[in-house]
Image (spheres, rainbow, N blue to C red):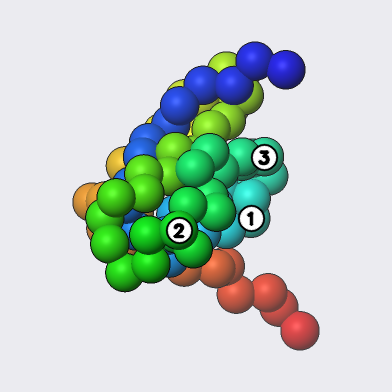
């Protein structure tokens, strides 16, 4: 399967948070470089890439831009 690089970071925690945001929106995400944080703990030597399918790229980019501009999206309140 072909994947496209959405973004990259040296912050493993941020990579996982962004992955969670995208997966909550129904976008499958693969992390490339994950695992290197155990080789270089506490350093910025490990770059993690977030990869998405080409057909999800535009929507994923919009969500990442929203996080950059406004912070993390809030979950909608469900009526009980």
Q: Residue 66: horizontal and vertical position, in percent?
A: 34, 48
* Structural distance between the alpha carbons of marks 3 and 1: 9 Å
Q: Residue furthest front?
A: 39
Quick one: 26 or 12, which is closer to the camera?
Answer: 12
Q: Decide: is 1 above or below 22.
A: above
Quadrant occupied by the C terminus: bottom right
Question: With 25 as the anchor, is 68 left or right in this view?
Answer: left
Q: Read off the residue under disc 1.
A: 24
* Structural distance between the alpha carbons of marks 2 and 1: 29 Å
Q: Residue 45: horizontal and vertical position, in percent?
A: 29, 50
Q: Decide: is 35 above or below 30.
A: below
Q: Tag 1's secondary structure?
A: helix
Quick one: 3 or 56, which is closer to the camera?
Answer: 3
Q: Read off the residue under disc 3.
A: 28
Question: What residue is drawn where x is 43% and y is 31%?
Answer: 6
Q: Residues within 10 Å of mark 3 (few under 14, many from 20)?
A: some
Question: Does residue 14 appear in the picture of this structure?
Answer: no
Question: What residue is drawn where x is 43% and y is 44%?
Answer: 48
Q: Mark 2 or mark 1: which is in front? A: 2
Label 3 or label 2, whichever comes before in sequence order: 3
Question: With 25 as the anchor, is 32 left or right in this view?
Answer: left
């Amino acid at each position: 399967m072909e994947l496209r690089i959405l973004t990259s970071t040296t912050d493993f925690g941020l990579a996982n948070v962004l992955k969670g945001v995208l997966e909550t929106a129904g976008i499958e995400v693969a992390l490339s470089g994950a695992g290197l944080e155990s080789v270089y703990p506490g350093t910025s030597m490990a770059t993690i890439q977030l990869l998405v399918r080409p057909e999800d790229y535009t929507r994923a980019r919009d969500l990442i831009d929203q996080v950059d501009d406004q912070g993390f999206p809030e979950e909608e309140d469900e009526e009980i």
